[in-house]
Amino acid sequence: MEEEGTGGSDNIVTEFNTYEDFLDSQITPLDLFYLEDQELARQLVELGYRGSGEVLKREEFEARKRAAEASRLAQNNQQKKLASDDKIIKDPLLAALAVREAANRNGKMTSIIFIRDRNSRGQEISGYIDYAFRLKTEDFEPYFSGKKRLLPRPSDLSFYNWETTTSTSNPTPNYQVIAENASGLLFKNKRDRKIINVDPKAPTPGDNSERHVINTNKYIQAVIYDHINRRKT
């Protein structure tokens, strides 16, 4: 019974913004008609002489209000916990992705991951992955914990199977793919319209972008293209 009472109080403090709102909810039009004083009506509710709800003193209401807010913030922080948190990461690619996870989740950065390796069938594959989009559509905890290998898929920005010569390209919420281009494969950021050139021979990948070669023995080749998002003015 005690737990039920506590739950009811928690509902009360989350339903009403102020203690006065809580008191007013238990005052009827008839009370105001006879008392002709809203403040007096509030005092009678606080003392338990009016109202049919639970009697709560101001100090108790405000204390539970603070507790409810603290609980809400704790839940939000738990929900915002990164997939890479509390992980012992040894692979350089995963370590680099862990550093970039928060920025890709909050939209400050949209990184493109290039991976070349072999799939479960031993076939050599390569592709470009929209990291921010994958983070939103997939649980990355198995990758950071080492339970699963990160590999490109036919549904990613770009995918190529070197043995079957299967090739695909797909736009994402962050990037448009420009495949038919003399300079090679390009990606256009949909927020600021900047072009990311993934040609390793290019002097730079483009404005607000950086190319980082990752030295890892877990993959044949791994490169990260970081793009800092800036809205077009």
Image: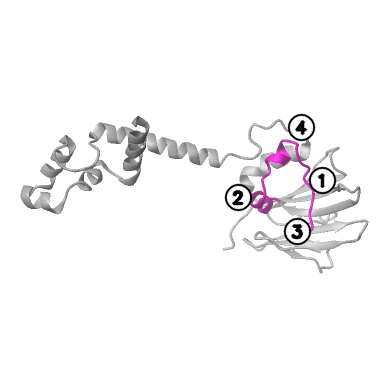
Q: Position of residue 41 (x, y in %)?
A: 13, 44
User: Which image quarter: residue 99?
Assistant: top right
Mark 4 vs mark 1, foreground winner is 4
Residue at image mark 1: 222
Q: Residues within 10 Å of mark 2 (few under 14, many from 20)?
A: some
The amino acid type of the residue labelled 4 equals Lys
Helix, strand or loop at disc 1? strand
Mark 4, residue position: 90
Which amino acid does the dot numbered 1 rest on?
A: Ala
Q: Which residue is mark 3?
A: 155
> In the image, 150: left or right of 18?
right
The image quadrant where one finds the C terminus is bottom right
User: Which label sits in the foreground, 3 or 1?
Assistant: 3
Which residue does the image show at 25% across and 41% down from the upper left?
19
Q: At 60% across and 50% down in the image, what residue appears?
A: 108
Instruction: Identify the residue at horizontal 54%, vertical 41% (top origin).
Output: 79
Mark 3: few/some/many CA within 10 Å (<14, 14-19, 20+)? some
Q: Nearer the viewer, mark 2 or mark 3?
A: 3
From the image, state whether disc 2 or disc 1 is nearer to you.
Answer: 1
Cα–Cα span, label 4 and label 3: 28 Å
The span from disc 4 to disc 2 (Cα, nearest Å) is: 25 Å
Segment tinted magenta in the rendering: 131-154
Q: Nearer the viewer, mark 4 or mark 2?
A: 4
Residue 156, picture quadrant: bottom right
Q: Secondary structure at mark 4?
A: loop
Disc 3 to disc 1, C-alpha distance: 19 Å
User: Which label was assigned to residue 108?
Assistant: 2
Q: Give me the C-alpha separation between circle 2 and circle 1.
A: 22 Å
Q: In this orientation, which residue lies closer to the viewer: 215 or 86?
A: 86
In the rendered view, tell whether residue 26 sits above or below residue 197: above
